[in-house]
Amino acid sequence: EDGVTVEELAEKLGKTPAEVIKVLFMLGTMVTINSSLNDEQVELICLEYGYEAKKVNNASALNFEDMDIVDDPADLQPRPPVVTIMGHVDHGKTTLLDHIRKSRVAEGEFGGITQHIGAYQVPVNGKKITFLDTPGHEAFTAMRARGAQCTDIVIIVVAADDGVMPQTREAVDHAKAANVPIIVAVNKIDKEGADPDRIKNEVSELGLLPEDWGGDVPYCNISAKKGIGITELLETVIIVAEMAELKANPKRLALGTVVEGRLDRGRGPVATLLVQNGTLHAGDPIVVGSTFGRVRQMLNDSGRSLKDAGPATPVEITGLNDVPEAGDKFMVFPSEKEARRIGEERAKIKQEKERNTSSAMSLDDLFNQI
Ligand code: GDP
Ligand code: MG
């Protein structure tokens, strides 16, 4: 029997085994800490604690992307913001991300080498900011196209010596469509002839009225290369995040989005996940896109091994059967049996879809040949 035990379920729900045993006792079932629970019992306990395990145990769990996640407001806690940097090519996105990533190593809190896992966290005045470090907005766009909304704040980088360019407009459009707060970073102010005020004028015409002109968009003048204005930019992110009152429930089973997936020769499928709600634990049974497994190794962006990862934490995990795609959703299930059932079913549906599209294409090819 592969069911979840009383002890495992209690841990996932943030309760003591005694509490879980008591709930079942009140419902007329005697169990011990090591008892394996059946689906119905898991469902009853989860319901008791306000979790919608019911959905996990029926067909709708197959489409967990569309599940309504309802948390008890009492369980909600502030979480770090997830930030994406966008802008025209060569305006300094990579330089800015690199500068921010390196500067936190200097802060000593993270000590050591940072890994490149597609996302990272930096400490700012005792708070944290999570940066998505995916290549440009292609990934952001791809993720959004797949319904993955995992950015809370967008920083639009505009080079002071170049101004608004086609991809600047595109980035602004994406940020507006995502309905998230925007911060404008006017970059390269160290360059000779740079005129940040002219840029501000240009950018404001995209409907981004600066705060100091009575609007609600913060503008920061920076030099990503020289490290000028970055502290102010990060502090602005914290202020904007606080106004957004971002919250999540660290007690629930984790769910979130795949930032990157790849096959490592030694370690097998490796995925960078962004935990968006709940806490991900080493050992958790998990469905990721149309693959599944158990979280075997979990590393943070410094390559350090983690047992638990709360909301807005980016982690790299192994233990999946297959490589997921960026933008895939993941969700932890109460038991490995459940994760396997849902994962296998989703894989089957995906195969079916792929077969249909490929046969449709060959039909097209056929017509093309006639
Ligand atoms: P991306 O395409 O938006 O990622 O732009 P990059 O970060 O690759 O930067 C493009 C070029 O601009 C590189 O040669 C950078 O060194 C340079 N650059 C980036 N930020 C600054 C800056 O603040 N000042 C100056 N002078 N050059 C910068
Ligand atoms: Mg770049």
Image (spheres, rainbow, N blue to C red):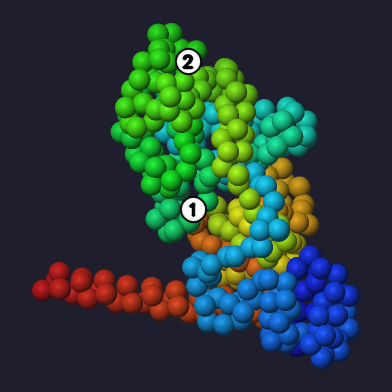
Q: Is residue 331 at all visible to an observer of this figure?
A: yes
Task: State the SS at label 1.
Answer: loop
Identify the amino acid type marked 2: Ile
Q: Quadrant of residue 156?
A: top left
Nearer to us in this view, 349 or 216 = 216
Point out residue 278 in the picture as x, y percentages from the top left corner: 67, 59
Q: Is residue 335 at all visible to an observer of this figure?
A: no
Q: Quadrant of residue 169?
A: top left
Q: Quadrant of residue 231?
A: top right
Q: Quadrant of the N terminus?
A: bottom right
- Marks 2 and 1 sit apart, C-alpha to C-alpha, by 32 Å
Identify the amino acid type marked 1: Gln
Q: Which residue is mark 2?
A: 189
- From the viewer's perspective, tell me whether residue 168 is left or right of residue 327: left
Q: Earlier in the sequence, mark 2 or mark 1?
A: 1
Q: Is residue 349 above or below residue 294?
A: below
Q: Which residue is mark 1?
A: 149
Residue 129 image label: none
